[in-house]
Image: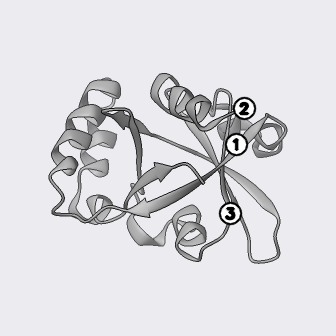
Amino acid sequence: MAFDDVVRVLDETRVVAVITRRADGTRVATPIWAVVVDGVPYLRSAYGPSSWWYRHVLAGREVEFALGDGRIAERDRQAALDLPAEPVAVESVAADDPVQRDIDRALEAKYAAEPESVAAMKSPEAVGCTLRVVAP
């Protein structure tokens, strides 16, 4: 597997499973949304900085993505952990970075059927929690 596989999954899959680690090292899968803008994947924490997966990332813990349909994590987090996974690195994206507008448009296009959830992803709190996914 390679980082290109991660980009493809994040682009083509409606719900992805981000895998982070608790303080004790236990892997945990969380279903989230992701978009790809100009070949670069982005994530936002719809719940802002209080989301525990986002806190794990900020704490510098390992980050992976399951290479499969992340909706499985909505039903069975353990099953999502059994999927092949690829490690990634992330970088914070400033709220005033011009790419934020492109991320908003990508969210609107990919998740058009869920306008209320898209609105949450475009809130100032969520925009302030935008991450760029990069190769480790």
Give the secondary structure at mark 1: strand
Give the residue drawn at x 62%, y 31%.
Answer: 71
Residue on which disc 2 sits? 1
On screen, 33 above or below 14?
A: below
Which circle's residue, 2 or 3, is located before the other in the chain? 2
Disc 2 to disc 3, how far (Cα)? 17 Å
Residue 53's x, y, as percent? 58, 62
Mark 3 is surrounded, within 10 Å at the Cα level, by few (under 14), some (14 to 19) or many (20 or more) other residues, namely some
Residue on which disc 1 sits? 86
On screen, 68 above or below 62?
A: above
Task: Quarter of the image for the N terminus: give it.
Answer: top right
Residue 2 is left or right of residue 111, and the answer is right
Q: Nearer the viewer, residue 102 or 2?
A: 2
Give the residue drawn at x 52%, y 65%.
Answer: 54
Which circle's residue, 1 or 3, is located before the other in the chain? 3
Q: Nearer the viewer, mark 2 or mark 1?
A: 2
Give the residue drawn at x 82%, y 76%.
Answer: 24
Residue 63 is left or right of residue 109, and the answer is right
Which circle's residue, 2 or 1, is located before the other in the chain? 2
Give the secondary structure at mark 2: loop
Residue 43's x, y, as percent? 42, 49
Residue 23's x, y, as percent? 75, 77
Whether pointer 2 and pointer 1 mark residues with C-beta atoms closer than 8 Å, the reply is: yes
Q: Amino acid at mark 3?
A: Glu
Disc marking residue 62: 3
Give the residue drawn at x 38%, y 34%.
Answer: 36
Disc 1 to disc 3, how far (Cα)? 11 Å
Q: Nearer the viewer, mark 2 or mark 3?
A: 2
Residue 54 is left or right of residue 131, and the answer is right
Q: Amino acid at mark 2?
A: Met
